[in-house]
Amino acid sequence: MASLKECARDLVHRRDISIATYAVDDHTIMAEGALVDDRTNEYHLLSGEARPAGIIHHMVIRVLAEGPALIIREIEVEMPGAPRAECAETRDCLAGARGMAIGPGFTKQVKALAGGPRGCAHLVTLLLAIAPAIIQGYWAHRARRRVTADTAAPRKKMDGMLRNTCHVWREDGPTYAKLMRHLDGETSSPQPPSPAGEGGALKR
């Protein structure tokens, strides 16, 4: 059987999601994410109207998050491209995310806030992609300085973000145990494994 890549024929759609994170101060970062859906062929709406090839969705979300709890302090939404005028009515559907902590349960909260008829599926998709990138970005920012038991996030927060999020961070694994010992001050080992470099996935 041919590989899946060899089965591919005409390109009909491309979705690109890009996310960048910027330092604001020692404990605050701003993440900017963009989602772009590009249809590479002429297409037809359900009404039968023909549309030319090109970008059908272009969504931008900016999030100001404060650590170590990674609380969303501010959120902005732009819609440079949308297929229908009424899409703009959903621009404020994520306003209720202010005050949410990015961690376990975040996905469920966002879907309850703006899923289905309450908002825009593409904005929800983008925010849920930005959330784990914020975790990575925050630790990339903090990891520019050596992490110690005194300067790391509280042990409980670290534990909640990492434990059992992937194979590397399984609670009975050596990497997780080493980091917890480090944060408990039981070892003076070198720089502990960083969530910015390994694992650190967002729990659902």
Image (spheres, rainbow, N blue to C red):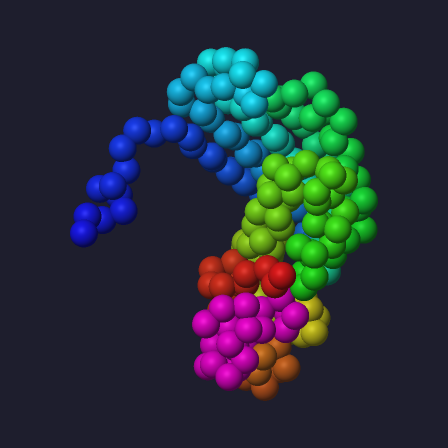
| Residue 127 part of the magenta segment | no
Answer above or below: position of 13 versus 157. above
Q: Residue at left 59%, top 60%?
A: 202
Please tell me how many numbered marks the rendered image carries: 0
Nearer to me, 176 or 13: 13
In the image, what residue occupies the spot 46% across and 81% down? 174
As rendered, which of 55 and 65 lies closer to the eye? 55
Q: Is residue 185 above or below residue 52?
A: below
At x 51%, y 38%, the residue is: 17
Residue 90 shows in this picture: yes
**Occupied quadrant, residue 83:** top right
The percent coordinates of residue 105 (x first, y second) are 70, 61
Is residue 182 in view?
no
Q: Which residues are magenta?
A: 158-179
Query: Residue 85's spot in the image, x, y percent?
Result: 69, 19
Relative placement, left or right, of 136 versus 41 is: right
Quadrant of the drawing holding the C terminus: bottom right
**Residue 104 place in picture, x, y as percent:** 67, 64
Q: Is residue 2 left or right of residue 132?
A: left
Residue 3 screen position, x and y as percent: 22, 49
As for residue 167 lying within the magenta part, the answer is yes
Where 156 sits versus 5, above or below?
below
Task: Please tell me which residue lies in front, 16 or 169.
Answer: 16
Q: Residue furthest bottom?
A: 186
Q: As drawn, which residue projects farthest toward the left?
A: 1
Q: Quadrant of residue 108?
A: bottom right
